[in-house]
Image (cartoon, rainbow, N blue to C red):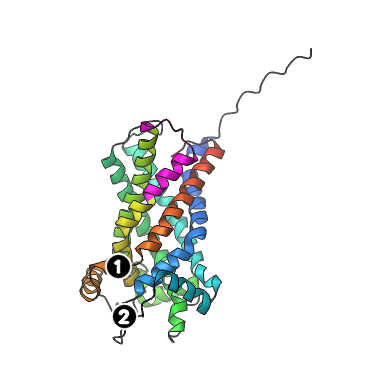
């Protein structure tokens, strides 16, 4: 009988697969995939959050429900407008998603000395990592988020008879720079950072905790089913914690400015909070919650499935 050739030994994995910069790149790719799939819900959410807001002439943006807003955008502006501003969202995630995941991993492994093979990671440590990672990433990415919000509102502004405010991502950056300088690029950054800290407390912390909890208390292996279950938990908690700050962030970023770059509707995020609650009630802080939840659940699912699968294909450590 012919001899069977000996099996080839497994080649060692390249050192870069578990490096922070590789994690950064994988995070950005996963975020782009999730963003493209769920972006229309983000656009609808932004439009809903502006409804009921007083404009500078004393009138109000008319109310529409979620489905009416979606159908209205499709009918009045075209289906392709559901992805208006998506390129700014991609630019944001080049900074935001890579930074938040890399920072969380670095804090977890370098500061708290937590190994990816450890089954238990204290919730308070995970929460501290999530809040810190989200706040830092969002502060750095705030200019891109500002441009994205302005681009998302352009279609609605034109239908209301207002002249175009911006004509593309580069024009938006330039106009923000010209009217407000460096400070203008970070307009709305305070509620933005607050929102990101809460969202990542819900997303990163919940996903990490839920995944480890499921693996520790069930016989399920680390597979797609576990990732789906943890992602669903993360999406709901993130939406619940982040919606009020998201409403304030959207309104502060979208308000018109005077010739000195100051807001005409709100002087600060606290002022926006007070005026919103006074004129529309506490429930206004949860405007857009349904599309936020409907988006965060599939966004979180798409992101984490893509992230974990790419890591698996590379042979890198799972989350």
Local packing at callout 1 (Cα closer than 10 Å; few below 14, some 14-19, many 20+) is many
- Residue at point 49%, 55% (across, down): 34
Local packing at callout 2 (Cα closer than 10 Å; few below 14, some 14-19, many 20+) is few
Q: How many marks?
A: 2
**Residue 233, labelled with which disc?**
none
Quadrant location, the C terminus: top left
First in sequence: mark 1 vs mark 2: 1
Predominant SS along the magenta part: helix
- Residue at point 31%, 71% (across, down): 252
Quadrant location, the N terminus: top right
Q: Are marks 1 and 2 in contact (CB under 8 Å)?
A: no
Q: Residue furthest top?
A: 1
- Residue at point 26%, 75% (across, down): 266
Q: Secondary structure at mark 1?
A: helix
Q: Which residue is mark 2?
A: 260
Residue 80 coordinates in the image, percent (x, y): 55, 71
Q: Which residue is mark 1?
A: 248
Residue 156 coordinates in the image, percent (x, y): 44, 78
Q: Is residue 301 left or right of residue 131?
A: right
Is residue 126 on the magenta stretch?
Answer: no
Observer-side mark, 1 or 2, equals 1
């Amino acid at each position: 009988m012919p001899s069977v050739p000996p099996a080839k030994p497994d080649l060692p994995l390249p050192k870069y697969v578990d490096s922070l910069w590789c994690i950064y790149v994988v995070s950005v790719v996963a975020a782009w995939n999730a963003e493209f799939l769920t972006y229309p819900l983000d656009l609808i959410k932004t439009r809903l959050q502006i409804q009921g807001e007083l404009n500078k002439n004393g009138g109000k943006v008319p109310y529409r429900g979620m489905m009416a807003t979606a159908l209205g955008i499709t009918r009045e502006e075209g289906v392709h407008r559901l992805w208006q501003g998506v390129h700014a969202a991609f630019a944001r995630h080049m900074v935001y998603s890579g930074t938040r995941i890399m920072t969380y991993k670095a804090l977890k492994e370098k500061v708290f000395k937590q190994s990816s093979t450890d089954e238990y990671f204290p919730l308070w440590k995970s929460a501290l990592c999530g809040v810190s990672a989200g706040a830092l990433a969002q502060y750095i990415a705030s200019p891109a988020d500002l441009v994205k919000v302005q681009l998302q509102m352009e279609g609605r502004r034109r239908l209301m008879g207002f002249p175009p405010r911006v004509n593309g991502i580069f024009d938006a950056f330039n106009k923000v720079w010209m009217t407000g300088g460096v400070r203008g690029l970070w307009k709305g950054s305070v509620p933005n950072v607050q929102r990101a800290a809460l969202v990542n407390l819900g997303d990163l912390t919940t996903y990490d905790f839920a995944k480890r909890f499921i693996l520790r208390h069930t016989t399920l292996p680390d597979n797609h089913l576990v990732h789906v279950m943890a992602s669903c938990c993360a999406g709901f908690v993130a939406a619940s914690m982040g919606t009020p700050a998201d409403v304030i962030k959207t309104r502060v970023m979208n308000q018109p400015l005077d010739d000195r770059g100051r807001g005409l509707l709100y002087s600060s995020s606290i002022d926006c909070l007070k005026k919103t609650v006074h004129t529309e009630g506490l429930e206004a802080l949860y405007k857009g919650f349904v599309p936020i939840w409907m988006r965060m659940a599939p966004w979180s699912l798409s992101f984490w499935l893509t992230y974990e699968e790419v890591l698996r294909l590379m042979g890198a450590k799972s989350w």
